[in-house]
Image (cartoon, coloured by chain):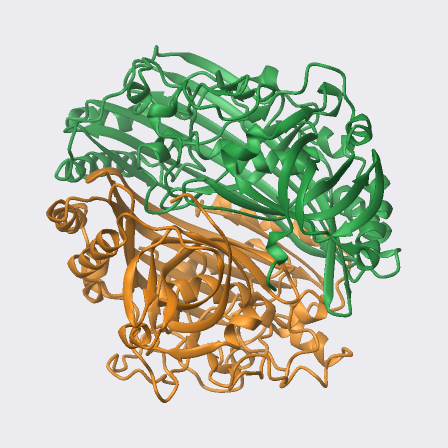
C-alpha cells in the first residue's frame, strides 16, 4: 500500500518540480478485489492495485489539474508540467481562493483528521473524532475466503431450488491531500460488499450490505433473506397501477432520496438548478423528517476532509421537515455571501463538502444520516398496520423527470409484494413510479430505526425503512 | 510491450493456465468545460497499466497492476492464476472458448486532427464563444459547455499467439442552456444532451458540429419552453428525432441483446433480458421496416463502438440483430457463442481500461435508414396528429428491458401535417416489442446520424463504455404519451 510517508516524499518532489505559486496534490488508490457469481458459479473474479496522483497548480487566479498513476520522477515532472501549462492559459478566476492552510482547513479547530483515533462503535451517536475505518481482517481477505463465502450463498440457493448471482468484494484504500501551504491529511480505509440476487422461475429476491469491517457482513443471513423474497414473490400477480401506501425497505429509501442531495450544494442555488431555490427555511417535508450529514457517525464511511482538505462538519440539513443548511466549498461560501441569496440560505460557511478543484458542481453532502423518530416501527409492524399497500425491496433505474418538484421515475425490482389486512399476500408484477420526492417525504407515516443501507442508485447512507401514503405507481411491467 | 506481455503469459502458463491474455493500456484524456462565462474544469489525465486474464482449472482469474516492472508483472500473472483456482471452487461447468484464429495486427482510429495538438486556449475560446451566445438570450440562467478528448493505446497479446496493437481516439463536444423562472427549470442541449455528440474521431468532429452557429437558437428554445403548453396526455402518433431514437435503441435493443444478460450473468446488477434464447429467429421484434445491426466495423462509421479488434482479439464484425422485424442475433463473446449455436464470437468484448475485465458491450447498434427517400419535414407533413419529441431529458427501463419511459427536452404538436405548437415536458412510455412493432416510417440516409453514448454503465465493478447508435427520425403509431405526469 502507498504509505503517508511515501506520499509526503512524492509531494516534496512535485513541489521541487513546480514553479507555480501554489501546488496541491491529491493521492488516491489501493487494492481492490471482487468475486462475482451467477448461475451458482463464480464467473468473474478480479483484483487490481493502482495509485494515482492528481496535481493542481495555481498561478494567481488561474488553476488547473493533471493526473497520472505513474510515480517515477519523469512522470511526475510531466504531470506537473501538464498541470502548469493548463493553468497558465486559463482566464483569470476572481473567485479562486488561495489554498487553505491547516488551521483554516480545520475550521479554526484543532481537529484530528487522520482517521486514526479509536472510538466505540457500539454507540450510535456521532463523535468529534473519526472512528478507525481500517480493519486488518477486511484487508486480509483472500480469493479463497471470498470463494468460501460464495459457496455458502450458493448452498442457500440450492437448498431453496433457486439460482443465485451477486458479488463479494473487499478492498483497502488510501486518500490523501498535501498542499504548499503546509496542509497534509491522510486517510486509510477498508471496505467489503456482499450483494445477492436469488432467482426463481418467475421471481427474484435481493439483499446487499456494505461495511468497512467484513465481520459486520453475514453472507448466510443475507442469502436466506434474499431467498425468502424470491420464494414468497413466486407466481406474481398483476394489480393495477395507482396510488398506494408503500413500505419502502431501507435500500429503496436510499435509492430514491439519494437524488436530492446534489441540490443541497450551495452551488446548486447559485446556478439556479436546485429544487431548494427559494425553499431554504421553509417547511418542505413532513415534521418527522430530520437529516444530518455526519462523516463521524459510526455507521458512516469515508474520509473526514474534502477535495481541498477542509474538515467535514456535522450539519443538520433538514430539521423537522424544514431545510436548514446547505453545504459549501470555500469558494462557494464566499460567492454566496456576496450573492442575492445570502439572507435566505441559512448559515453560510465552508463546511468541508467541496470537490477537488477546479469543478463545476461545487459540493455534495455524502455522509447522510436520517434521524430516528421517537416511535420507530419495524417493517413487520408497518405491514401489520397496513390495510392495503405494497412492500418494496429495492428500486431501479431512477431518473429525474422534473427538476423543481423533484419528480422521479423508476421501477420496483427483486421482491415487490401486495399487502392487505396487515399481511403480505403475494408477489406482484413490478411497477413504474412517477413520484415527487417532496410529496413522498411529506407523506411518511412511519419509520424504522435507521441502518447503513446499500443500493445501486445512490451512495451508501444511514436511512430507515419508510411507510409512505399515496405513492404514485403509473404503469405495470410484464414480470 | 511484447516483452512485458511475455513475462505475464510465461508465468501464467507455467502456473497451469490453459489460456492467458495480457493487455497493456495507456490512456490519456483531456476534459474542458465552462459554466456561465468561466472555465468550470480543466484537467488532463493519464493512466497506464496492464492486466492478465487467465483460465485455470476451467475458471476465470484476472489481476491488474499499475506497476509494469518484471517482478510486478510476474506476481500479477501468478495472482491471476491463484484467483482462477479460487473461482474453480464454485463452478458448475468448465469455461470453453470458441476458437479464434491468432492475429498480428495494427489498427488506429482514422482521424484528421489529433485533438491533443489543438491549443487549450483555442478550445477554451471556442467554449466561451458558445457560452456568450447562450447567455446573450434573456432568461438563460445557466450555460454549460464541454469538450472531451480521449486516446487509448493498447497492446493485446494472448497465449494463442495474437499480438494486436490498437490506438483509439474519441472526441465529445456539446452544451446546455437552462432557464429557471417561477417554479420551473427548462433546458435545451446541443447537439444532444448529457455531453453532446461523441464519436471516434479527432478534432474534426468539433469543427463539423457548428457549435457556435446553433447556440442562439438553442437558448431561445429553452426560454420559450416556459411559455409553451404542457404536452397533452393520451395516445398519439410519436415522431422521435434521431438522437432520442438512438437512446431508445440503446435501452430497448442494445441492452436486451447482450448475451451475458440473457444468460443471467448480470442478474445482480444490470439485470437480465426478456430476449430468452428461444426467441432467436422466432420473435417478431418490430415491424417489417425495422432493421438493426451491431456493427463495429469502420465502414459503419466513426461510432464509439467502432474498433479493429475487440479485447479478446476478435476482429470487428457486423451482426444482423433485427432483420425486417425478426429478431436474428445477439451480442456474444468467445465464452458465450456456443450457447446460441455459434462457433465464433461476435467480437463485442471490451474493457474500460487496463484494470477492468473485458465484457460484452454494445458496439454500434444502429437502426438502418429507410430505403425510400423521406426527410423529417416530409414525415411531419404526412402525420395528421402527433407529437414530435427531441433531445432526451430522462430515461428509465426495467431490468428485463420491457417497460420504458423517456422524457424529452422539447416537443411539437403536429396537426394536419404541420407543427401546430411547441409543448413542454413531453414524455412517452411503452413495452419494448409493442413499441418497435408500432414503427411505420423511417427517414432516409440523409437524416441518419451515428450518435455516441459515452456513459453506458455495466458490470461489477462498474465499467463505463462508449457505444454508438445510428438512427434517422422515425414515426411510431399510437404511443402512450404523458403518463410521467399523471397523478402528480
Residue in view at x 69 percent, y 14 percent: B371
Residue A159, visible in the rendered structure = yes
Q: In this view, does B197 lie above or below A199?
A: above
Residue B116, visible in the rendered structure = no
Q: Where residue A257 sits: x, y (%)?
A: 49, 67
- Report which quarter residue A21 is drawn in: bottom right
Q: Where residue A212 sits: x, y (%)?
A: 29, 65
Q: Which chain is green?
A: B
Residue in view at x 68 percent, y 24 percent: B442
- Report which quarter residue B474 is drawn in: top right
Closer-to-camera residue (B323/A27): B323
Q: As drawn, is A6 to the left or to the right of A244?
A: left
Residue in view at x 27 percent, y 25 percent: B20
- Report which quarter residue B448 is drawn in: top right
Task: For chain A, give the colour.
Answer: orange
Image quadrant in which the N terminus of chain B is located: top left
Q: As drawn, is A15 to the left or to the right of B443?
A: left
Q: As drawn, is B39 to the left or to the right of B327?
A: right
Amino acid at each position: 500500500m502507498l504509505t503517508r510517508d511515501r506520499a509526503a516524499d512524492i509531494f516534496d518532489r512535485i513541489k521541487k518540480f513546480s514553479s507555480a505559486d501554489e501546488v496541491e496534490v491529491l493521492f488516491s488508490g489501493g487494492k481492490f478485489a471482487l468475486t462475482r457469481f451467477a448461475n451458482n458459479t463464480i464467473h468473474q473474479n478480479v483484483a487490481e492495485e493502482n495509485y494515482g496522483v492528481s496535481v493542481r497548480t495555481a498561478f494567481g487566479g488561474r488553476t488547473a489539474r493533471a493526473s497520472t498513476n505513474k510515480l517515477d520522477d519523469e512522470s511526475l515532472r510531466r504531470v506537473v508540467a501538464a498541470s502548469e501549462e493548463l493553468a497558465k492559459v486559463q482566464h483569470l478566476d476572481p473567485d479562486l481562493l488561495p489554498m487553505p492552510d491547516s488551521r483554516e482547513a480545520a475550521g479554526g479547530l484543532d481537529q484530528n483528521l487522520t482517521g486514526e483515533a479509536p472510538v466505540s462503535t457500539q454507540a450510535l451517536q456521532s463523535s468529534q473524532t473519526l472512528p478507525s475505518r481500517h480493519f486488518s481482517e477486511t484487508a486480509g481477505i483472500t480469493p479463497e475466503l471470498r470463494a468460501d463465502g460464495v459457496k455458502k450463498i450458493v448452498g442457500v440457493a440450492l437448498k431453496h431450488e433457486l439460482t443465485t448471482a451477486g458479488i463479494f468484494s473487499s478492498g483497502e484504500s488510501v486518500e490523501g491531500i498535501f498542499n504548499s501551504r503546509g496542509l497534509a491529511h491522510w486517510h486509510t480505509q477498508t471496505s467489503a460488499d456482499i450483494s445477492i440476487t436469488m432467482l426463481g422461475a418467475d421471481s427474484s429476491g435481493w439483499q446487499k450490505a456494505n461495511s468497512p469491517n467484513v465481520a459486520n457482513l453475514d453472507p448466510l443471513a443475507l442469502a436466506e433473506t434474499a431467498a425468502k423474497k424470491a420464494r414468497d414473490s413466486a407466481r406474481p400477480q398483476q394489480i393495477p397501477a395507482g396510488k398506494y401506501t408503500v413500505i419502502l425497505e431501507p435500500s429503496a429509501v436510499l435509492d430514491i432520496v439519494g437524488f436530492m442531495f446534489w441540490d443541497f450544494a450551495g452551488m446548486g442555488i447559485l446556478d439556479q438548478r436546485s429544487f431548494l431555490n427559494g425553499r431554504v427555511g421553509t417547511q418542505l417535508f413532513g415534521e418527522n423528517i430530520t437529516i444530518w450529514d455526519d462523516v463521524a457517525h459510526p455507521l458512516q464511511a469515508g474520509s473526514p476532509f474534502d477535495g481541498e482538505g477542509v474538515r467535514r462538519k456535522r450539519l443538520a440539513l433538514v430539521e423537522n421537515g424544514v431545510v436548514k443548511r446547505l453545504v459549501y466549498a470555500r469558494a462557494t461560501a464566499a460567492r454566496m455571501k456576496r450573492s442575492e441569496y445570502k439572507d435566505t440560505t441559512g448559515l453560510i460557511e465552508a463546511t468541508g463538502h467541496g470537490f477537488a478543484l477546479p469543478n463545476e458542481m461545487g459540493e455534495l453532502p455524502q455522509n447522510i444520516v436520517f434521524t430516528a423518530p421517537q416511535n420507530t416501527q419495524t417493517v413487520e409492524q408497518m405491514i401489520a398496520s397496513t390495510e392495503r399497500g405494497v412492500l418494496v425491496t429495492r428500486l431501479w433505474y431512477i431518473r429525474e423527470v422534473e427538476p423543481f418538484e423533484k419528480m422521479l421515475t423508476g421501477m420496483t425490482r427483486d421482491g415487490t409484494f401486495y399487502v392487505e389486512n396487515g399481511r403480505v399476500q403475494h408477489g406482484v408484477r413490478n411497477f413504474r413510479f412517477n413520484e415527487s420526492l417532496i410529496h413522498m417525504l411529506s407523506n411518511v407515516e412511519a419509520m424504522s430505526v435507521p441502518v447503513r443501507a446499500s443500493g445501486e442508485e445512490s451512495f451508501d447512507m444511514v436511512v430507515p425503512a419508510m411507510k409512505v401514503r399515496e405513492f404514485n405507481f403509473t404503469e405495470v411491467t410484464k414480470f | 510491450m511484447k516483452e512485458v506481455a511475455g513475462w505475464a503469459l510465461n508465468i501464467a502458463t507455467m502456473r497451469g493456465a490453459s489460456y492467458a491474455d495480457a493487455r497493456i493500456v495507456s490512456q490519456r484524456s483531456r476534459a474542458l468545460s465552462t459554466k456561465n462565462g468561466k472555465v468550470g474544469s480543466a484537467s488532463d489525465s493519464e493512466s497506464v497499466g496492464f492486466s492478465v486474464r487467465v483460465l485455470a482449472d476451467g475458471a476465470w482469474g484476472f489481476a491488474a497492476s499499475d506497476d509494469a516492472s518484471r517482478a510486478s508483472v510476474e506476481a500479477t500473472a501468478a495472482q491471476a492464476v491463484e484467483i482462477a483456482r479460487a473461482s474453480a471452487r464454485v463452478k458448475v461447468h468448465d469455461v470453453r472458448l470458441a476458437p479464434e484464429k491468432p492475429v498480428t495486427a495494427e489498427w488506429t482510429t482514422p482521424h484528421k486532427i489529433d485533438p491533443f495538438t489543438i491549443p487549450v486556449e483555442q478550445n477554451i475560446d471556442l467554449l466561451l464563444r458558445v457560452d456568450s451566445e447562450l447567455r446573450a438570450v434573456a432568461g438563460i440562467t445557466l450555460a454549460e459547455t464541454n469538450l472531451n478528448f480521449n486516446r487509448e493505446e493498447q497492446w493485446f497479446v494472448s497465449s494463442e499467439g495474437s499480438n494486436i496493437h490498437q490506438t483509439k481516439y474519441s472526441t465529445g463536444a456539446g452544451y446546455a442552456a437552462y432557464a429557471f423562472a417561477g417554479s420551473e427549470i427548462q433546458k435545451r442541449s446541443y447537439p444532444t444532451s448529457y455531453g453532446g455528440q461523441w464519436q471516434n474521431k479527432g478534432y474534426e468532429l468539433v469543427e463539423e458540429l457548428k457549435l457556435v452557429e446553433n447556440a442562439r437558437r438553442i437558448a431561445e428554445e429553452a426560454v420559450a419552453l416556459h411559455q409553451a403548453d404542457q404536452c397533452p396526455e393520451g395516445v398519439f402518433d410519436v415522431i422521435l428525432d434521431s438522437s432520442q431514437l438512438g437512446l431508445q435503441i440503446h435501452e430497448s435493443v442494445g441492452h436486451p441483446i447482450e448475451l451475458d444478460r440473457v444468460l443471467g450473468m448480470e442478474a445482480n446488477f444490470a439485470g437480465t433480458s426478456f430476449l430468452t434464447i428461444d426467441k432467436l429467429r422466432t420473435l417478431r421484434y418490430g415491424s417489417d421496416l425495422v432493421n438493426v445491426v451491431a456493427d463495429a466495423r469502420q465502414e459503419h462509421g466513426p461510432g464509439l463502438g467502432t474498433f479493429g479488434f475487440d479485447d479478446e482479439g476478435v476482429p470487428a464484425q457486423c451482426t444482423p440483430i433485427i432483420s425486417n422485424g425478426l429478431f436474428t442475433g445477439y451480442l456474444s463473446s468467445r465464452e458465450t457463442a456456443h450457447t446460441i449455436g455459434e462457433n465464433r464470437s461476435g467480437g463485442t468484448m471490451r474493457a474500460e481500461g487496463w484494470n477492468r475485465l473485458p465484457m460484452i458491450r454494445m458496439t454500434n447498434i444502429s437502426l438502418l435508414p429507410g430505403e425510400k427517400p423521406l426527410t423529417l419535414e416530409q414525415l411531419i407533413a404526412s402525420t395528421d396528429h402527433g407529437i414530435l419529441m427531441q433531445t432526451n431529458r430522462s430515461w428509465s427501463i426495467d431490468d428485463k428491458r420491457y417497460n420504458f419511459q423517456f422524457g424529452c427536452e422539447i416537443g411539437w404538436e403536429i396537426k394536419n401535417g404541420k407543427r401546430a405548437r411547441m409543448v413542454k415536458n413531453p414524455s412517452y412510455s411503452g413495452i419494448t416489442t409493442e413499441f418497435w412493432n408500432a414503427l411505420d416510417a423511417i427517414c432516409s440516409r440523409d437524416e441518419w446520424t451515428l450518435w455516441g453514448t459515452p456513459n453506458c454503465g455495466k458490470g461489477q465493478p462498474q465499467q463505463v463504455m462508449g457505444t454508438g447508435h445510428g438512427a434517422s427520425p422515425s414515426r411510431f403509431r399510437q404511443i402512450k404519451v404523458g403518463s410521467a405526469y399523471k397523478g402528480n
